DNA sequence: AAAAAAG
């Protein structure tokens, strides 16, 4: 058990903030302290129970060996990681009391930040970054880097995920777009890897697109500034021609296929990997990716590897899958599952037809162009088409999709970030993870295929607590699918016309219609 | 039934 002084210091320190939380504990009229005590005890208990239940469930599944196709490896079990906290049951009643108080305090913090956890013995959330030093002996360079990069207070996902990963537990986490998930998994990696100690790759981060992998690498390097960590992005050249037996690399960031290629053809050895992160994990579990992921997971054969899944959307299917695969994992949900960032103003615009979309777009540009603006379309063809169309106007516009050469993709992103491009047209290649500072507006020119696509697309704006705006065009054929998006909107506090909400619930289906050409006039048929 | 990921 760590110093109890932190515990009490914390409680004293936050008395004022308490008052706000206190209001949330409804129906407590009497003596404040007493009321607080009672309600929290109840809370702590229920959370414990939930943890026990889910661990039982896990065990049962493990026994029956619920096989999931394509996931042979995940089933190989980890040795149980030692529990750092809450489990030092020495028979002194005063220590028991302290532990109990700690549990209460943990739950107060979680409630305050909208953190929901399940799993047994979940480590306490952080109160501040400084606590990394007092509680986990974090080196000062890291805290210095945090400060220099402007990270003052940990975000909810960082508060909970960092201690859990530091304690060696596996994690699957769901937290809103732009809420600092990258730092949440990079920080514990940097803290746990003793730099230069071993000549082997000891952390692998997988991302669904190259641009995201590049961004994550950059972020990682910034956070490691001043320490001799070898952080590498799996580039085309590296995958093709590196001598991996000699390459110095502590942390490797890659897209799945390139990594698979390097393992197969270049004898890349991942047997000493200690941390494996699947960023945008629900995307990585999609058909086509999942086989590659399975291959990489197998290659990380160290039995004590700590796997973690991060995303802003966590469909039940993926969650079920994850539950069967991960061992003694802690599930962390920030806010409500599968919701959009609260800071984005979301609007729906009826555009009627393809022609109507173009008119609506021109109107937005003429009336209130507030660059930079990111525009999503459904397909590569349509991206090209819309690019041609907008290139005619006097606006700095560019386009990105996967059929462009890598360098051109990179440039498109860089120019957009640098403000050289005002309007970027994109396929869903740019829908996930990318952090465009100061992006004001996302326009869904084509209706998103699913609620999760919608959440990720609009999540390119409104990051790190800033405001954002999202406009979604829809046509007649999109109407049956409107409700999926409208639900997301209402859940994040945006107003939706009541006729949409009273529409019948559409059955879950991906919406990917054949659309008329962007420049098509009104339809002749019908 | 599109996009992404090796070339």
Image (cartoon, grey):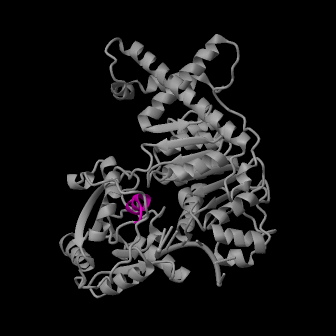
Quarter of the figure with the N terminus of chain A: top right
Whether the magenta-drawn stretch holds residue A23 is answered as no
Query: Is residue A475 shown left or right of residue A130?
Result: left
Residue A415 x/y as whole percent:
42, 76
Write the residue at 21% across / 78% down.
Answer: A359
Up-down: is A252 above or below A410? above
Up-down: is A214 above or below A396? above
Give the camera-side residue of A209 and A144.
A209
Query: Is residue A231 shown left or right of residue A506?
Result: right
Residue A214 x/y as whole percent:
56, 68
Which quadrant of the structure image shows residue A198?
Answer: bottom right
Q: Furthest-left residue in view?
A: A367
Quarter of the figure with the C terminus of chain A: bottom left
Residue A160 x/y as whole percent:
54, 40
Up-down: is A204 above or below A234? above
Give the overall secondary structure of the magenta segment.
Answer: helix
Write the residue at 27% across / 78% down.
Answer: A354
Give the camera-side residue of A513 and A305.
A513
> Which stretch is magenta?
A449-458
Write the residue at 33% across / 47% down.
Answer: A491
Residue A323 appears in the rendering = yes
Residue A195 appears in the rendering = no
Give the camera-side residue of A29 and A146.
A29
Query: Is residue A454 shown left or right of residue A323?
Result: left
Give the camera-side residue of A453 and A476.
A476
Which quadrant of the structure image shows residue A237?
Answer: bottom right
Whether the magenta-drawn stretch holds residue A450 is answered as yes
């Amino acid at each position: 058990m760590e110093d109890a002084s932190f515990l009490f210091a914390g409680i004293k320190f936050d008395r004022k903030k308490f008052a706000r939380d206190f209001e949330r504990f409804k129906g407590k009229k009497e003596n404040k302290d007493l009321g607080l005590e009672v309600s929290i005890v109840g809370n702590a208990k229920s959370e414990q129970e939930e943890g026990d239940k889910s661990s039982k469930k896990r065990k049962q599944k493990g026994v029956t060996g619920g096989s999931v196709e394509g996931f042979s490896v995940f089933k190989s079990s980890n040795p149980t990681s030692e529990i750092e906290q809450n489990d030092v049951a020495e028979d002194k009643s005063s220590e028991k009391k302290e532990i109990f108080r700690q549990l209460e305090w943990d739950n107060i913090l979680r409630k305050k930040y909208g953190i929901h956890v399940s799993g047994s013995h979940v480590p306490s959330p952080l109160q501040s970054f400084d606590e990394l030093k007092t509680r986990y002996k974090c080196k000062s360079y890291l805290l210095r880097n945090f400060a220099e990069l402007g990270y003052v207070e940990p975000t909810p996902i960082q508060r909970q995920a960092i201690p859990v990963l530091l304690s060696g537990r596996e994690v699957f986490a769901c937290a809103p777009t732009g809420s600092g998930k990258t730092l949440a998994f990079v920080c514990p990696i940097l803290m746990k890897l003793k730099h230069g100690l071993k000549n082997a790759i000891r952390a692998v981060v997988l991302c669904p697109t190259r641009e995201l992998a590049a961004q994550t690498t950059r972020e990682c390097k910034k956070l490691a500034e001043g320490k001799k960590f070898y952080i590498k992005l799996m580039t085309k050249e590296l995958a093709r021609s590196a001598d991996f037996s000699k390459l110095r690399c502590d942390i490797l960031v890659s897209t799945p296929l390139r990594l698979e290629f390097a393992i197969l053809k270049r004898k890349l050895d991942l047997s000493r990997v200690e941390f494996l992160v699947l960023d945008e994990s629900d995307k990585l579990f999609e058909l086509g990716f999942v086989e590659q992921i399975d291959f990489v997971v197998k290659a990380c054969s160290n039995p004590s590897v700590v796997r973690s899944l991060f995303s802003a959307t966590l469909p039940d299917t993926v969650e079920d899958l994850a539950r069967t695969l991960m061992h003694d994992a802690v599930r962390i949900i920030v806010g409500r599952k599968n919701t959009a960032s609260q800071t984005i103003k979301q609007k729906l615009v009826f555009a009627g037809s393809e022609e109507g979309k173009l008119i609506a777009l021109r109107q937005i540009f003429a009336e209130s162009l507030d660059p930079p603006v990111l525009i999503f379309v459904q397909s590569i063809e349509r991206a090209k088409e819309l690019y041609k169309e907008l290139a005619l106007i006097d606006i700095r516009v560019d386009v990105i999709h996967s059929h462009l050469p890598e360098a051109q993709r990179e440039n498109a992103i860089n120019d957009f970030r640098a403000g050289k491009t005002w309007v970027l047209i994109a396929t869903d290649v740019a829908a996930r993870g990318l952090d465009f500072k100061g992006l004001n507006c996302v326009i869904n020119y084509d209706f998103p295929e699913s609620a999760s696509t919608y959440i990720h697309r609009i999540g390119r704006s409104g990051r790190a607590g800033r405001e954002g705006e999202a406009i979604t065009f829809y046509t007649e054929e999109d109407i049956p699918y409107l409700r999926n998006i409208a639900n997301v909107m209402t859940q994040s506090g945006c107003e939706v016309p009541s006729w949409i909400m009273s529409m019948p619930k559409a059955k879950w289906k991906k919406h990917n219609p054949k659309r008329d050409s962007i420049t098509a006039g009104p339809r002749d048929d019908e």
